[in-house]
Image: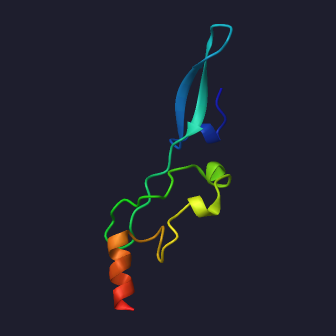
Amino acid sequence: MPTRAQRSGHYRKTKVRLPGGSTETHYTPHRPKQATCGTCGAKLHGVPRALPAEIKRIAKSSLRPTRAYGGTLCSKCSREALKAL
């Protein structure tokens, strides 16, 4: 029987076969959406699609590009923002 929290749509049901031959349902959270640019809405490259528990284990330098506005704006929009400054 799933817990009350697992009954929401936040969790995805996956059937897992156990060594004894029986199957069991595991509840895993859905993957987050791809990060998007704050200005134009384009998908950002170099930003991982990971759950918060997985992001905690990733090095900070691997979480976003190191350029200015990295992780919030795409390269085209960040270039325009730097020109405006």
Residue drawn at (67%, 11%) of the image: 19
User: Which corner quadrant of the image does residue 3 belong to?
Assistant: top right
Q: Split into 4 quadrants, where in the image is the N terminus?
A: top right
20 sits left or right of 34 in the view: right
The correct choice, above or below, for 64 with respect to 9 in the image is: below
Q: Position of residue 61 (x, y in %)?
A: 60, 63
**Quick one: 70 or 6, which is closer to the camera?**
70
The correct choice, above or below, for 50 with respect to 42 in the image is: above
Q: Residue furthest top?
A: 21
Residue drawn at (59%, 21%) of the image: 16
29 sits left or right of 40 in the view: right
Q: Position of residue 29 (x, y in %)?
A: 56, 41
User: Which corner quadrant of the image does residue 4 belong to?
Assistant: top right
Q: How many marks?
A: 0
Residue drawn at (63%, 42%) of the image: 5
Residue drawn at (64%, 31%) of the image: 2
Q: Split into 4 quadrants, where in the image is the C terminus?
A: bottom left
Q: Position of residue 67 (x, y in %)?
A: 48, 73
The correct choice, above or below, for 26 with respect to 61 in the image is: above
User: Which corner quadrant of the image does residue 20 belong to?
Assistant: top right
Q: Position of residue 13 (x, y in %)?
A: 53, 30
Q: How is the image coloured?
A: rainbow
